[in-house]
Amino acid sequence: MPIENKVGKLSDITKIIKDGDKVAIGGSWLGGHPMAIIREIIRSKIKDLTAITVVGSIDIDLLIGAGCLKRLMFSFVSMEAFGLAPNFRRAIEKEGLPYDEITGLAVIIGLEAGGRNVPFLPYRGPFGSDLVKYRPEFYKNIKCPFTGEELIAAAAIVPDVAIIHAVRADKTGNIQMEGTTGTDIEMMRAAKKRIVSVEEVVPSEEIWKHPEKTKVPKFQVDMVIEAPLGAHPTSCAPHYVFDAWHIMKYMEYAASAETFKKYVQDYVMKPEWEYLEAIGGMRQASILRRLAREVKFL
């Protein structure tokens, strides 16, 4: 029986991600976001997406600024020490982007319900919050049939597609991750289709040497894309730290909707290899990797 090869190119994402899809985006804070796939979504002019994130940052801000989203489900979106996410803030405050703001724990529980193929899962919270009143499509008051305890039910979240970035994979789709995994695993289990970009595709024999690092098995993966520096400008433990220099430059471009258009043209609309050259190529990569070693990522 032939071994299925799930390796594709960035341009192949249009075979899976379609206009109007609900897309769960992995990573958290300024770490581990599938930025190469995010940029390809913009290049491919995929529109009307509903993005699902727990702790989003430049990934969400970039998609909003490029006009790819029609709705956002989130717990938190921030550029951390670099400030508020400019496109996100403009879209929420002034441009009327529809959104569902729910707690991070509720998003995780909703994804777990989706991964288990049940309509909801119960938990103790968020009691006393107006979220239950303002998000009745997601939260319901329920009573435990065994103890009578008052609980909250979180509705299942089933993304059409999940996209994450990881350290390595083999061509069959076994995905290895190191460091924090955020909500990536829950997203992969819940989604109908899954795309993973990785720093490298390696022979299966290399995967078998460290089975404990395989966090997502091949049957939960539809496409693998080899994309070195594919999380840039966010970090990818243990390979490299986030690129503070590029993020500061991004924040300058994103200060207004007009100047942000130039960022998209200068950095996003060109092929990925040109993006990597534009951000400093191998020289910048070596700096980020050296810093990773110095802060004991490696």
Image: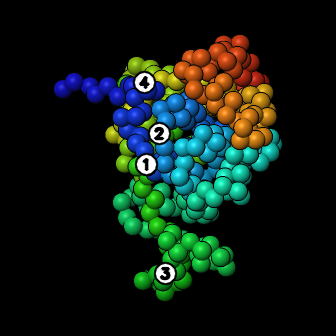
Q: Quadrant of the C terminus?
A: top right
Give the structural element (helix, strand or loop) at label 4: loop
Q: Which image quadrant for residue 243?
A: top right
Q: Position of residue 95 (x, y in %)?
A: 66, 55
**Disc 4 to disc 2, C-alpha distance:** 16 Å
Please indicate whether residue 271 sits to the left or right of residue 223 in the image: right
The reply to whether discs 2 and 1 touch (Cβ–Cβ < 8 Å) is: yes
Which residue does the image show at 66% across and 24% down from the upper left? 266
Of tags 2 and 3, which is closer to the observer?
2
Specify few, some or many for label 3: CA neighbours under 10 Å numbering under 14, 14-19, or 20 or more: some
Q: Which mark is residue 21?
A: 1
**Disc 2 to disc 1, C-alpha distance:** 9 Å
Quickly name the residue at label 2: 46
Q: Which mark is residue 127?
A: none
Give the structural element (helix, strand or loop) at label 1: loop
Please indicate whether residue 212 sits to the left or right of residue 100 in the image: left
Q: Which mark is residue 142?
A: 3
Which residue does the image show at 67% across and 79% down from the upper left? 128
| Residue 174 seen in render | no
Quickly name the residue at label 4: 9
Which residue does the image show at 74% across and 34% down from the upper left? 259
Disc 1 residue type (three-letter): Asp
The reply to whether discs 2 and 3 touch (Cβ–Cβ < 8 Å) is: no
Task: Pick out the residue farthest to the front.
Answer: 258
Earlier residue among tags 2 and 3? 2
Q: Nearer the viewer, residue 134 or 190?
A: 134
Specify few, some or many for label 2: CA neighbours under 10 Å numbering under 14, 14-19, or 20 or more: some
Disc 4 residue type (three-letter): Lys
Task: Pick out the residue farthest to the top.
Answer: 283
